[in-house]
Amino acid sequence: MTGDEVLRPQSLMLSFLGDQVLGRDVCVYSGSVIDVFGRAGVGEQATRSTLTRMVGRGLLRRQREGRRMYFGLTGRSEAVLRDGEQRIWEEGAVNRQWDGTWTLLGFSLPESWQRQRHDLRARLTWSGFGPLYGGLWIAPGETDVSGLVAELGLSAHVKIFRAHADAGMDIGAMIEETWGLAELAARHEAFAVRWQPWETAEPAADEALALRLRLSTEWLQVVRRDPRLPVKHLPDDWPAAQAERTFRTVYTRLTPLAQEAADRLLDLVPVRPPL
């Protein structure tokens, strides 16, 4: 019933770790991960490769216990997971609290800096910005991107301001011109259509664990690509609220069964301090 949404194994892995490891000071056995991911449609080799790559990127740490290898969080992966947790459960998909503030970011890069320009635009889009004009981008609220600008080595080429629109400004039209509203709406609508059947369906416990993993991963992808535009300036039929209701309803419905399966299937050990 979930359609053909393709989810990257690393995205699934982060959701799995957020659900089962974050905040518990435990490591999880690789065989347990392979078992759960197999139920979610990810093969053993892809799961092992994902674990290895995430260790290499500083997102996981290994801990050997006898002949078994366990994996735990690093400071970096914990920060990523906390950010995702906040995005889903605290900020949500509907921005009803906007105070009229915008963050404006202007940049001017040498013509030859095509890669830097591409990287900056990609990171700004991920952070909720849209292109007001070529070198002037805008995001609702007070969005702090000084860190990512510094990380890209572009601080000397970027200027960031807070602003309010003039009283005569048509904010709804500006939003329509700056962000692809049709594409944003389609993501929310597609999510709701895929997951609404599970508001009433009765999965088995093992299936519920895999379903909740996919549900969390898909929803985080939807909200991370949504700039949380002020709802009062969006079309009346904006679908984000319905999609969020579907997510919360299905998540709540799946959780008791999913946790029952996790308690039975997952081999967890306490984190050992480094020697």
Image (cartoon, rainbow, N blue to C red):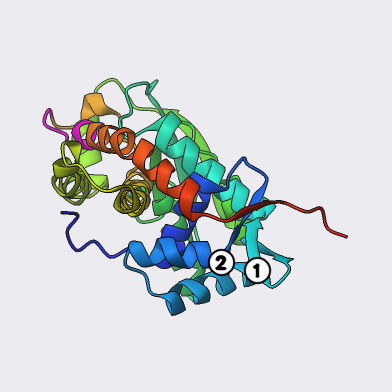
Q: Are marks 2 and 1 in contact (CB under 8 Å)?
A: yes
Q: Quadrant of the C terminus?
A: bottom right
Q: Is residue 183 magenta?
A: no
Residue 176 vs 10, above or below: the answer is above
Mark 1 burial class by Cα count in 10 Å: few <14, some 14-19, many 20+: some
Residue hosting label 2:
30
Residue at image point 69% right, 73% down = 67
Question: Where does the magenta region start and end?
Answer: 236-243
Q: Is residue 238 magenta?
A: yes
**Mark 2 falls on what kind of element?**
helix
Residue at image point 61% right, 48% down = 78
What is the C-alpha distance between the residues marked 2 and 1? 6 Å
Q: Is residue 107 visible?
A: no
In the rendered image, the residue lying farthest to the bottom is: 45
Residue hosting label 1:
69
Pick whichever of labels 2 and 1 is earlier in the sequence. Answer: 2
